[in-house]
C-alpha cells in the first residue's frame, strides 16, 4: 500500500502526554484543547484542537506547552512528508529523486519529535519500503526502524508490514496473531488491513486452504465492511469448490456495494456463474 493510502487514511492517533500543563484562555479552556488533541484520532483531533485554539484567540498557548507543541509539530512534519511523498510518486523517477530528501527529512523529524507515536514510525517504515532503492528505499532500514520501536507491540506490528512487503505471508500472519492493538486505532486499522492483505497474498499464490480462514477471521474484525473481505473470501471458497458459501459471500459483497468497480464487476460475474442474483 502506498504512502498516500496509508497516511492520508490514518494521519493518526492519540499520543498521550501525561504531564501536560494547562494555561488560562479567555475563550475556550486550554484543558479542553489538550484533551481534544490527546483523546481523538489523529489529524481530526489535532485539527479540532487547532480550531479551539483559534477560537480562543491565543495561538501562543501552543508554545507555552512543550508537550502539545511537540505533538502538533510531529503531526505537521508527518503530514508534510506524506503530502510531498504522494506528489513525488506521481511525478516519475527523476522528479521523485529531487524531492525524496525533503520527504525523508520530514518523516524522520516527525519520528524524532514523537518517537512513541505509532503513525510517525509507521510512516518512516512505509517510506523505506515504498521508495525505490536508488533514492533511499531499503528493506533493511525499514526493518531497523520497525525493530527499534520503544513499544514491543509497535515493533511487532511494523515487522509484519515488512514481512508483507517481502511476500512472507505466513510469517506476517504469525506476527499478526501476536499483535494486540489495544486503544491505538491506527495500529488496529493496520492489523485489519494487513490480515486481509496476507490472506490475499496466500490466495494469489494458490493457497486457498490457508487463505480461507484468514478471510473468515478478517470478516469478524471491526470495520471489515469497509474492506473487500467477502469478495476475497468468495474467491477462496470458490477455489476450494465450496459453491454455496462462495455464492453467499459474493452476494453480501455485491449487496454492500462498497468495493472498487473492478472487484464489484468480477463479483457480479462470478455470482451469475454460480446462479446467484446480481442486482
Image: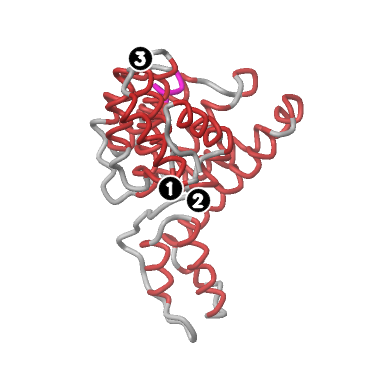
Measure the alpha-carbon separation of dots 2 and 1: 6 Å
User: Which of labels 3 and 2 is toward the front?
Assistant: 3
Q: Give the range drawn in magenta.
A: 162-166
Q: Which residue is drawn at 59% across and 26% down?
A: 131
Counting from the top left corner in percent of width and height, residue 102 is at: 65, 38
- Type of secondary structure dominating the magenta stretch: helix
209 displayed left or right of 85: left
Q: Mark 2 and mark 1 in contact? Answer it, CB < 8 Å.
A: yes
User: On screen, 117 above or below 193?
Assistant: below
Front residue (pair 207, 101)? 207
Which mark sits nearer the N-terminus, 2 or 1?
2
Give the number of the disc on residue 79: none
User: Is residue 17 located in the magenta-colored stretch of the structure?
Assistant: no
Establish if 135 lies above or below 76.
above
Rate crowding at label 2 as few (under 14), some (14 to 19) or many (20 or more) other CA atoms within 10 Å: many
Looking at the image, the residue that sits furthest to the front is 275
Q: Which residue shows up at 56% across the image and 23% down it? A: 137
Q: State yes or no: discs 3 and 1 in contact (Cβ < 8 Å).
A: no
Instruction: Report helix, strand or loop for mark 3.
Output: loop
Residue at x 33% of width, y 18% of height? 241
Per the model, the C-alpha gap separating discs 3 and 2 is: 42 Å
Q: Name the residue under label 2.
A: 74
Question: Which residue is tagged 3?
Answer: 207
- The reply to whether discs 3 and 2 touch (Cβ–Cβ < 8 Å) is no
Which residue is label 1 attached to? 114
Please name whichever residue, 218 or 15, is drawn nearer the observer in this view of the structure.
218
Amino acid at each position: 500500500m502506498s504512502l498516500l493510502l496509508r497516511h492520508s487514511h490514518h494521519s493518526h492517533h492519540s499520543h498521550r502526554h501525561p504531564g501536560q500543563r494547562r494555561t488560562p484562555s479567555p475563550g475556550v479552556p486550554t484543558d479542553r484543547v489538550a484533551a481534544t488533541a490527546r483523546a481523538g484520532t489523529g489529524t481530526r483531533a489535532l485539527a479540532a484542537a487547532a480550531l479551539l485554539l483559534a477560537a480562543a484567540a491565543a495561538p501562543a498557548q501552543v508554545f507555552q506547552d512543550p508537550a502539545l507543541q511537540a505533538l502538533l509539530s510531529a503531526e505537521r512534519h508527518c503530514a508534510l512528508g506524506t503530502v510531498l511523498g504522494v506528489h513525488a510518486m506521481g511525478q516519475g523517477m527523476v522528479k521523485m529523486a529531487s524531492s525524496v530528501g525533503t520527504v525523508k527529512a520530514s518523516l524522520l523529524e516527525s519520528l524524532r519529535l514523537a518517537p512513541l507515536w505509532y503513525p510517525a514510525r509507521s510512516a518512516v517504515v512505509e517510506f523505506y519500503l515504498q521508495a525505490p532503492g536508488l533514492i533511499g528505499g531499503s528493506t533493511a532500514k525499514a526493518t531497523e526502524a520497525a525493530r527499534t520501536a520503544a513499544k514491543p507491540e509497535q515493533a511487532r506490528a511494523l515487522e509484519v508490514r515488512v514481512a508483507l512487503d517481502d511476500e512472507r505471508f505466513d510469517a506476517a500472519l504469525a506476527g499478526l496473531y501476536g499483535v494486540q492493538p489495544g486503544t491505538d486505532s491506527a495500529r488496529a486499522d493496520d492489523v485489519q488491513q494487513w490480515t486481509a492483505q496476507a490472506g490475499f497474498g496466500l490466495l494469489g499464490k494458490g493457497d486457498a486452504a490457508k487463505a480461507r480462514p484468514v478471510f473468515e477471521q478478517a470478516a469478524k474484525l471491526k470495520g471489515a465492511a469497509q474492506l473487500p473481505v467477502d469478495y476475497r473470501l468468495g474467491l477462496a471458497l470458490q477455489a476450494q469448490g465450496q459453491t454455496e458459501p462462495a455464492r453467499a459471500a459474493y452476494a453480501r459483497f455485491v449487496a454492500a456495494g462498497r468495493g472498487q468497480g473492478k472487484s464489484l464487476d468480477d463479483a457480479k460475474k462470478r455470482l451469475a456463474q454460480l446462479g446467484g442474483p446480481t442486482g
